[in-house]
């Protein structure tokens, strides 16, 4: 069940915007505009005049002229009724230049013929013979017809709509990759239902209320809430504690993560013990002795699995699958902490000057990281902007 929230705050207008990688933003723009056209590259191809040779030709060409890493989406053979066509090898830059020159010459000749005789003339650009195409690495040409040049997609399709266009040019394989957000949903404002918006707004209200209380006490107006999406339970409410008793590392997200760690028998900051108990959700208290016992139990379970050969990886990370709601965009430190905690999604209200989830950096989209999570901005943005935050989150 979502927590009760201030109806006035929930009724304020705000929109949920996914924070995408530059590549996904470009993909979304193309998706919305409908202007989808693949980058193309030229390939030598030929008709298969003896279909019994198709398997042999495919194997030989795959061995001697394999598709490069970025071209593995291409299929070697296409059905071009009533015959089959097969890709031979890429056209080199020098060959492409020569073909362009020949094409320009033929266009000039064709134009002259058309103006004088008023007849249609096709593209008669000469293509090298098969023996010339395979001069450097000869193969058995049995079963191949006359070669021609065809343009094929240079990269794999990124979504179903692109795949429809790509397949109309040359047959390609398509493997849907995990996306930061569904493009169809993103193109319609995130595809958030009223019920989901109410749920998200309710949790953000908790973060805003905590930030306001901290601000009233002289601290920064920044709040963070950790939620278990499966149960709907609020696990931790944290506020910025970088004042005299805290330290430069105790941003709101760091505090919230540490509170979760303390519940699981960990915790790195002794100064947070008993902090803002009125803000935390009601749950069984964890004494120091109990915390140490839980920590020992987790380590024992891990070692038991390792020794028995049943452990294929680490035990679940600290915040695996949890959602985080924060009033202001997290900094690089907090974003890395969220990443290492394995959160599933971060919702934040307004941007921060040094924010690492959309403004200054898009850490959650970095291809070199072994975990990614969803990020959405704009939740109760006006209310979050009204809080006094300072420069860091």
Image: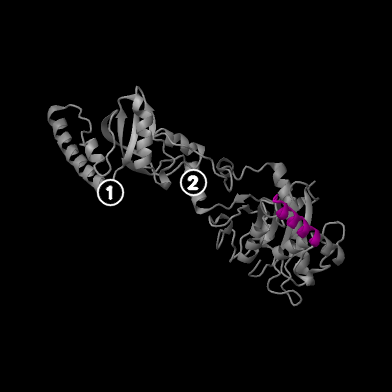
Q: How many labels does the image show?
A: 2
- Left or right of 108? Residue 334 is right
In this rendered view, identify the residue nearer to me: 268 or 221: 268
The residue under label 1 is 93
| Label 1 CA crowd tier, 10 Å (few <14, some 14–19, many 20+) | few
Expressed as whole percent of the image width and height from the top left, the position of residue 15 reads: 63, 49
- The quarter of the displayed image where residue 87 is located: top left
The residue under label 2 is 27
Instruction: Please identify the residue farthest to the front as the structure is shown.
Output: 308
Expressed as whole percent of the image width and height from the top left, the position of residue 161 reads: 49, 37
What secondary structure is found at the residue carrying circle 1?
A: helix
- The quarter of the displayed image where residue 222 is located: bottom right
Residue at 41% x, 41% y is 37
User: Which sits earlier in the primary sequence, circle 1 or circle 2?
Assistant: 2
Magenta stretch prevailing secondary structure:
helix
Residue at 18% x, 37% y is 106
In this rendered view, identify the residue nearer to me: 77 or 346: 77
In this rendered view, identify the residue nearer to me: 333 or 117: 333
Q: What stretch is highlighted in magenta?
A: 295-310
| Label 2 CA crowd tier, 10 Å (few <14, some 14–19, many 20+) | some
- Left or right of 15? Residue 119 is left
């Amino acid at each position: 069940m979502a927590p009760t929230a201030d109806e006035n705050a929930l009724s304020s207008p705000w929109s949920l915007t996914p924070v995408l990688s530059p590549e996904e933003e470009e993909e979304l723009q193309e998706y919305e505009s409908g202007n989808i056209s693949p980058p193309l590259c030229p390939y030598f191809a030929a008709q298969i005049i003896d279909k019994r040779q198709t398997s042999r030709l495919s194997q030989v060409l795959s061995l001697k002229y394999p598709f490069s890493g970025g071209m593995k989406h291409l299929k070697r053979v296409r059905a071009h009724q009533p015959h089959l066509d097969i890709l031979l090898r890429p056209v080199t830059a020098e060959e492409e230049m020569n073909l362009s020159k020949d094409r320009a010459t033929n266009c000039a000749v064709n134009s002259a013929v058309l103006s004088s005789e008023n007849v249609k003339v096709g593209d008669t650009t000469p293509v090298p013979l098969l023996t010339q195409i395979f001069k450097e690495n000869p193969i058995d040409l049995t079963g191949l017809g006359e070669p021609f040049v065809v343009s094929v997609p240079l990269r794999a399709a990124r979504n179903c709509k692109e795949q429809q266009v790509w397949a109309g040019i040359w047959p390609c394989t398509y493997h849907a990759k995990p996306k930061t957000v569904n493009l169809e949903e993103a193109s319609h404002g995130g595809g958030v239902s009223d019920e989901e918006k109410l749920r998200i707004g309710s949790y953000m209200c908790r973060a805003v209320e905590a930030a306001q209380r901290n601000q009233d006490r002289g601290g920064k107006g920044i709040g963070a809430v950790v939620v278990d999406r499966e149960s709907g339970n609020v696990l931790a409410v944290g506020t910025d504690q970088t004042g005299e008793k805290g330290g430069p590392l105790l941003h709101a997200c760091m505090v919230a993560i540490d509170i979760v760690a303390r519940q699981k028998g960990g915790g790195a900051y002794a100064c947070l013990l008993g902090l803002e108990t009125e803000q935390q959700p009601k749950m069984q208290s964890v004494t120091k002795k109990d915390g140490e016992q839980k920590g020992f139990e987790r380590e024992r379970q891990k070692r038991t699995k390792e020794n028995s050969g049943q452990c294929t990886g680490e035990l679940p990370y600290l915040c695996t699958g949890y959602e985080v709601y924060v009033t202001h965009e997290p900094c690089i430190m907090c974003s890395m902490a969220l990443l290492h905690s394995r959160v599933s999604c971060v919702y934040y209200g307004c941007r921060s000057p040094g924010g690492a989830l959309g403004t200054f950096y898009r850490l959650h989209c970095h291809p070199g990281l072994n975990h990614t999570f969803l990020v959405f901005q704009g939740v109760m943005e006006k209310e979050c902007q009204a809080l006094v935050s300072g420069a860091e989150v």
